[in-house]
């Protein structure tokens, strides 16, 4: 049997197919969310919360259960907890990472989450992403020994190790874009007003 192909011209408008999920990111939902927020800016207002309780010594526990956003209240699928403590060398019992280590964790994971989203939106497949992060701190500040030393980190270094189906310049651009859009990078590098009050006082 001989088959012949007919050439036809289809003048009907075609809708561009939405990108498929990539890097574990629901890309169609990501783009839908971006478009929805662009059309209704009030949906962008979020309030995240943590309730923290002192347990003993320098051991504390924070619980994150819900937040406000996209015009309403939301609950996590479970109540997440995070313990913090000081190591023995800093007079603690080492029941969890120190608070300043959580800052490193927050920065690294925020940068990587951003990279996954940005890469997915750009159609770049990530094979692996690892971040090494460390910060320098001088304890003379928090110990009250010197008022010329800041209490927090003096310097933080972040090193990405990325394996992606993209040339090096595109990977560098992904890292730069994840930095530029990172909420935690913004908080750490630009600061944020913090109000502290005491109930009944």
Image (cartoon, rainbow, N blue to C red):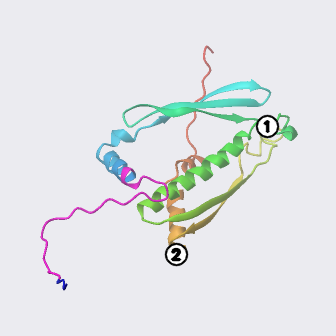
Which residue corresponds to mark 1? 86
Q: Residue at x 71, y 30 (%)?
A: 60
x and y percentages locating residue 189 in the rendered image: 59, 51
Q: Residue at x 42, y 64 (%)?
A: 122
Name of the residue lying farthest toward the bottom: 2
Query: Which quadrant would residue 140 be assigned to in this image?
Result: top right
SS assignment at label 1: loop
* Labelled pair 1, 2 in contact (Cβ < 8 Å): no
Q: Mark 1: few, some, or many residues within 10 Å (few <14, many ≥20)? A: many
| Residue 167's disc number | 2
Q: Quadrant of the N terminus?
A: bottom left
Magenta-highlighted residues:
5-29
Q: Quadrant of the C terminus?
A: top right
Q: Mark 2: few, some, or many residues within 10 Å (few <14, many ≥20)? A: few
x and y percentages locating residue 91 in the rendered image: 85, 35
Assess whether residue 124 is covered by the magenta stretch. no
Question: Would residue 40 be found to the left or right of residue 164 on screen?
Answer: left
Assess whether residue 14 is covered by the magenta stretch. yes
Nearest to the observer: residue 165 or residue 43: 165
x and y percentages locating residue 82 in the rendered image: 66, 35
One can see residue 50 in this view: no
């Amino acid at each position: 049997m001989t088959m012949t192909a007919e050439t036809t011209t289809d003048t009907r408008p075609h809708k561009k197919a939405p990108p498929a999920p990539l890097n574990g990111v629901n890309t169609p939902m990501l783009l839908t969310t971006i478009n929805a927020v662009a059309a209704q800016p009030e949906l962008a207002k979020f309030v995240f919360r943590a309730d923290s309780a002192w347990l003993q010594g320098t051991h504390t526990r924070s619980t994150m259960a819900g937040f406000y956003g996209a015009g309403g209240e939301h609950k996590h699928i479970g109540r997440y907890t995070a313990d913090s403590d000081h190591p023995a060398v800093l007079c603690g019992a080492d029941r969890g990472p120190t608070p300043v280590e959580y800052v490193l964790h927050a920065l690294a994971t925020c940068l990587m989450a951003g990279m996954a989203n940005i890469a997915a939106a750009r159609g770049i497949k990530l094979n692996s992403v690892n971040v090494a992060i460390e910060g320098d701190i001088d304890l003379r500040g928090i110990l009250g020994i010197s008022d010329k030393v800041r209490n927090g980190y003096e310097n933080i270094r972040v090193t990405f190790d990325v394996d992606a189906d993209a040339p090096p310049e595109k990977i560098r651009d992904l890292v730069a874009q994840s930095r530029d859009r990172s909420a935690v990078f913004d908080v750490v590098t630009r600061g944020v007003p913090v109000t502290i009050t005491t109930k009944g006082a």
